[in-house]
Amino acid sequence: MKWLRRIVWGITGIVWFLWLGYEDRSLTSVIAVAALIAFALGLEVLAKWTQKRPVKPTLWLLRCILIGAFAGAIVGPIIVVLAVGKISLHHHPTPDFELAGMRMLMGKSLTWIAAGALFGAAGGFLKLSQK
């Protein structure tokens, strides 16, 4: 799991660095970067939560679902932080991202939570199928 976390954080850092310099006004790239950051944070939480002792399969699956839901829940706030950070770095006369678009993405929190929980469940089932 340690190698996977390092690879995910490395990819996340590279994507974030490239995204900062890329002039793009669409929210798709912000969503992708935020989802990558949330995924990497979710892997960190899962690793810290399960490294002490072995976990029962049902508890493992529940933890994966909860951590996935947590990762999904933080996608919206990460999007806002990334967008505001990029706006403050570039100093354009008109902002790169509109407030209405960010507000719309924050309003989709339940969708992000559900997607994160499903992604966590998929990861949990994948791990259980390997045993």
Image: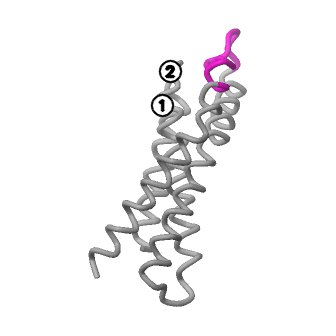
Residue 63 location, x and y as percent?
53, 70
Which quadrant would the N terminus be assigned to in this image?
bottom left
Left or right of 109 on screen, residue 57: left
Instruction: Tell me which segment is drawn in magenta.
Output: 91-103
Tag 2–tag 1 contact (CB < 8 Å): yes
User: On screen, 92 above or below 6?
Assistant: above
> Real-space Cα distance between discs 2 and 1?
7 Å
Which quadrant would the C terminus be assigned to in this image?
bottom left
Front residue of 114/25: it is 114
Label 2: state its secondary structure.
loop
Residue 67 location, x and y as percent?
55, 62
Residue at coordinates 67% horizontally, 34% vertically from top-left? Answer: 80
Of the residues shown, which amino acid type is indicated by label 2?
A: Ser
Verify whether residue 99 appears in magenta.
yes
Q: Which residue is mark 1?
A: 29
Residue 82 location, x and y as percent?
63, 36
Q: Which residue is mark 2?
A: 26
Of the residues shown, which amino acid type is indicated by label 1?
A: Ser
Residue at coordinates 46% horizontally, 65% vertically from top-left? Answer: 5
Residue at coordinates 54% horizontally, 50% vertically from top-left? Answer: 37
User: On screen, 31 above or below 93?
Assistant: below
